Structures are given as C-alpha cells and as structure tokens.
Amino acid sequence: MPESAPILEVHNLVKQYSSVTAVDGVSFAVPEGVCFGLLGPNGAGKTTTIEIMEGILPPTAGEVRYRGEPVGARFREEAGILFQKTALQDFLTVHQSVALFRGLYERGLDVDEVLELCALEKLANRDNRKLSGGQQQRLLLAIALVNDPTVLFLDEPTTGLDPQARRNFWELVESIKARRKTIILTTHYMEEAQLLCDEIAIMDRGRIIAQGAPQRLLREHFAEVLLELPRHEFPEIARGLPLKLIEASDRVEISTHDLDGTLRTLIEAEVPLRNLRIRPANLEDLFLDLTGKDLRA
Amino acid sequence: MMKRLLAVWHARNLEFLRDRPTLLFTLLLPVGIVIGMGIIFGGPPRPLFTVGVLGTRIDTRANAFLHERYVRFVPIHDESAGLHEVTHQRIDLLVDVHGPIRYWVNTDSPKGYIIEKLLIAADPGAQRQPVTGQAIPYVDWLFPGILAMNMMFSCLFGVGYVVLRYRKSGFLKRLHATPLTAFEFLTAQVLSRLSLIVFVTVVLYVGIGAIIHFHSAGSIALLLLLAIIGSLSMIALGLTIAARFSSEELVGGLLNLLTWPMMLLSGVWFSVAGSPRWVQWVADIFPLTQVIQAARAVMLDGAGIERIMPNLIYLAATTLVFLLFGAWSFRWRVD
C-alpha cells in the first residue's frame, strides 16, 4: 500500500491511574485510508489508548494530533465512534436513534442512506431495545457513520456476536473500507485483524511490542509452518532438541522451514504425533512468540 | 438459597461501603437532620398563636388579653398592613388596644376562631370588626403552594435521575464523542422538561381550579411566565445535583436533602411568618419560596409584574448560576 500523510499521530502517550500505568509511552501514526488495528489481550491498554485518541479521556502525558493539529472541534465533527459498550436513549426507534445523532453534526449522510448502508432499512421503525446483538451493533455503526466520518473508531466491535453476525459485520466494515475511510480497530480476535487490517500494532501491558503490516510481521517472526502439539504429550527430553519451540499454556508450537526434517527429529525422539497439527502461523502465534503468553489467557 | 442470599448481601455491603461519598452522606444526613430539627424546634415552648397589635410598641398593661400565655404579640404599626396579614392568615388575629378593644379575625381561620374565644373570655366587650377585603379560604391559600410543590418534585427528580441514568448507561459518554457541549446538553434537558412541566401545571391549574372554584385575581399570562421561570430555576438546580455524581443513593439523598427543607420552609402548607428571622432568610434562598410568594401575590392579591419582579429576577439569576455551575462540574462518564 502506498504511504500517505498520517491522519492521526500519537506521541508518547501515557495514562496513569493512581498506581496503574494503563498506557506507557505509546507512539504510532495512522496513514489516511488504512484500517489500523490495535491488538492485544484484555487489559493491554487498547481501549484506554483509543479513548484518548477519541478525546474521551485526557492523557497523563503525550498528545494526539489529527491532521497535524491537536484533537479538537474539527476532529469531533469528522470522527465516527463505536464504543465497546453503548446504551441508547430508551423508547426511540432505529430511525429516531440515528436521526438524533445526525442532528448533532453540521454535515453528514441522510438518515435513510445510513440505514441502507448498514442494512437496517427493514428495522427502521423498530424500538432500538428490541434488536438482536448483531442488529444493535449495526445500529451503533450507523450512528458512527451518520456524520460521514473521515476517521472511524471501532472498539471491539464484534465482541459478544455470534459467528454469523460477526461475519456480517466484517462485510460491512469491508464496504466502509472501500469508501477510503480511515479505520482504527481494536480487537482481540486475530482472525478479524488479519482479515480487516492493513497495519497493526500489538499492545501488551500498556506498550506497543510490534507494529507493521500483518503479513510482514508474520514473515519476520515465523518460518513457513507451525507444528502444534498438546503440551502434556510433549516429553521433557524433547525440549533439548534443536527446534524453535514456542510454549503456550496448553500446547507447544514448533516453527520450521523444514517440515520433513522436523518430523523426522520428533519421531526419532519418540514424541507422540497422533494429535499433531500443522498450520501456517497467525497473529495469535505472533503474540505468543513476543510475550510468551496466550492472547486469550 | 441462604448461601446465595449471603453472597449477594455481602457484595452489596462491600459496594455500599466502598462508595465513599454515599457512605459519608448516609452517615451525616441523620446527624444533620437531628441538629437542624433541634435548632428549629428546640428551645423554650413556642407560642401557639400570633396576634398583631396595632401600634409601634406593645404596652401589656393596656389589656388583660395581652398577658395570655402561648400567644406571641407582634406590633403592627399600619392598620392596612395588619388587615392584609390577618386576611392571609399570616397572623391569627389583629387587635387595637387603644381605647375600647377592637379586633379583626379571618372567619376561615381555625386558629383565628380559637384565639377569638380567648380574647372574648379576657375582654367580653371587645368589638369584632369586619375584615375588609375578601377573606381567603385556606384551600385557596394552599393552591399556589401545591402547584409549585408539584413543579419542584417534577423538576428535581424528573431531571436528576434521567441524567444519572444516561451517565451510568454510557449514553452520555457516546454523546460526548459528538460535537455536543455540556451546556447544550443541559440546556436541552432543561427545555425538554420545561415544556412537560408547564403543560402539567396548566392542566392542574385548570382542573383543580375548576373543582375548588378558584379564580386568580391576577393575570394568567403573568402566572404562566412565573411558572416558566420558576421551573427553569428548579430544573437547573436538579441538573446541578446530577451533573457530577454516578450513585443513585447519593443523588437521591441530595435531592431529598433539597426537597424536604423546601417543602417545609417554603410556605407550602403554612406560613413561616412566625418563624425565627433566620429561618425566613433560609427559606427565601429556595427557588420554591420565590415561586410560591410570587404565585400567591398574583393569584390572591392580583399583583402585577412590578410587584413580583424581584422574585422573577431572583429565579432567572439562579437559573443561570445553576446552569453555569452544572456545565462546569458536568461529567460525561462514570469515573
């Protein structure tokens, strides 16, 4: 993807809560028109970082710049936000809920247009409390899009959705990407990040531990394939073998370019292979490799 | 079942104990009430009746009636002012002890009826004087207070709890991510509630007025203006309370802390004219007192805008102060 001027820049961001440092010196830049993913486990500092970027939380130190200027009135007009958890005003229909937020912006899309974009036309007159989880998220996305934002923040948008609703939501995000919107996405679903993000930053304990395009990061950290074995079936003696081992809580992963040679080594060491899995590395493996712990532990 | 019950009981206790402002408030409120009641109602026995005596000072030798116990005698130098007070039941009787004793009593006043008996027992020759001007039945005197009190509850609780719920549900946080400012949000809440309250007050005025056959002596348009400005002030006060906190217990307690003194001291049920001066000063601070005073002046005395202008200015000024303070202290999200 060609480099473009950053639409958002984060400089040395710190957020301190009494004795806890939620964000610890985070810096990155987001080029215009990309989908930028902030990845990490719960408590990594993703939501705090994104809420500081949104202007919802004040930082303890550091700054966020939007188009080269501190986040201010222009940013609020041009940003669309979908929080991890949002309640809407009771007793409003879907159409009325979107119309309420449309009224808060100077410019934006027509309410019916947004409803159509988010596949909500048929639900326009339904009470917003009577929507399913997936429909509710689509409504919140419609609200985030109502001002036709240049930058869209999606904080864990598919958490709690069933697989079908999640895939539907991904399709919606893909269609928004096609409109050249800049998207900042936080998630702990690696599949989601791999599918949607052009660039990612992996966070752990308030710090960024890796950043770049997902495929490039995987190429840099892993060989061609990963072999995965249950931890309790991996003999202690085999840990001394000349292999690149990655220890997870319930499994042992082996990264290798030479699948045949590695398999021979394991057979010679009498490692049970009946539950062996061979697969390409993913972002979850990358997190494990970088931190020594499972993403969802 | 008991295990689950105890687990929930324990968790709730922890929640309550860790909510420091609410805990502090819960502990301090009863202490404050006890101290306040002691100050207001403690001390020597209170007089049961208030009698106005025409003149600049009271000479107790002038008549045996002036020695009655449990009666507070207050000098009133102007006869027309005294008649106004007795008509409005701010005093129970007005007497003139210069020469043969004369007295004025409001025939609709229960306390006036009893104190008249005491006067006649002390001085059978006392001459009853007709009260000039229309006597005001208690229900008519009460009516403006009831309307204003209803407005107060609707303003304070209706707005306070709604804002609190918005904050707790995260709806305010979502609004914060838009160009909406705190002042805009608060003003929108004020105006939304205002239209509802004015509508309800008009319905109550017409409905109850028809039942008790009440007719305002003053301008209906002026009453409407008063209802609007009075509501604005009390809604803004409610928003000020809800602007910052996220605890239902704390906000509920603070709203009660405001409504109870207002209900008792603003003259809804009885006049506070006989209360210590400082109690009247405290009462005058409350927007409800200003609304009731002005409403009674318009509805009972037919007062024009000039007479209630100080009340209107006070209410408008407090609206602005409460709104500005509310916007300054406003929190969009739960801390």
Image (cartoon, helix red, strand yellow):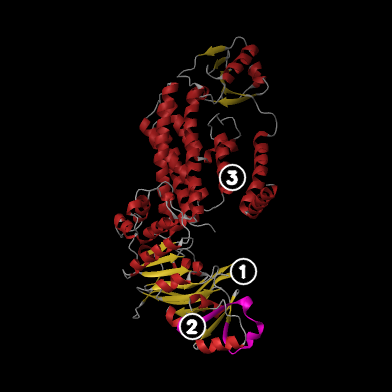
B64 in magenta: no
Q: Chain of mark 1?
A: A
Q: Whole-percent x and y of residue A97?
A: 38, 52
Position of residue B188 in the picture relative to residue A254 (left or right): left
**Which residue is the site of mark 2?**
A225
Q: Are marks 3 and 2 on the same chain?
A: no
- Residue A115: quarter of image: bottom left
Q: Secondary structure at mark 2?
A: strand
Q: CA distance from mark 1 to mark 2?
A: 42 Å
Front-lying residue, A258 or A34 = A258
Position of residue B9 in the picture relative to residue B170 (left or right): right
**Which residue is the site of mark 1?**
A19
Nearer the observer: mark 3 or 1; the answer is 1
Residue type beneath disc 3: Gly
Stretch of the chain drawn in magenta = A218-245
Q: Is residue A138 depicted above or below B77 in this figure?
A: below
Q: Are marks 3 and 1 on the same chain?
A: no
The quarter of the image holding the C terminus of chain B is: bottom right
Residue type beneath disc 1: Ser
Residue that appears at 45% across and 19% down: B134
* Of pointers 1 and 2, the one earlier in the residue sequence: 1
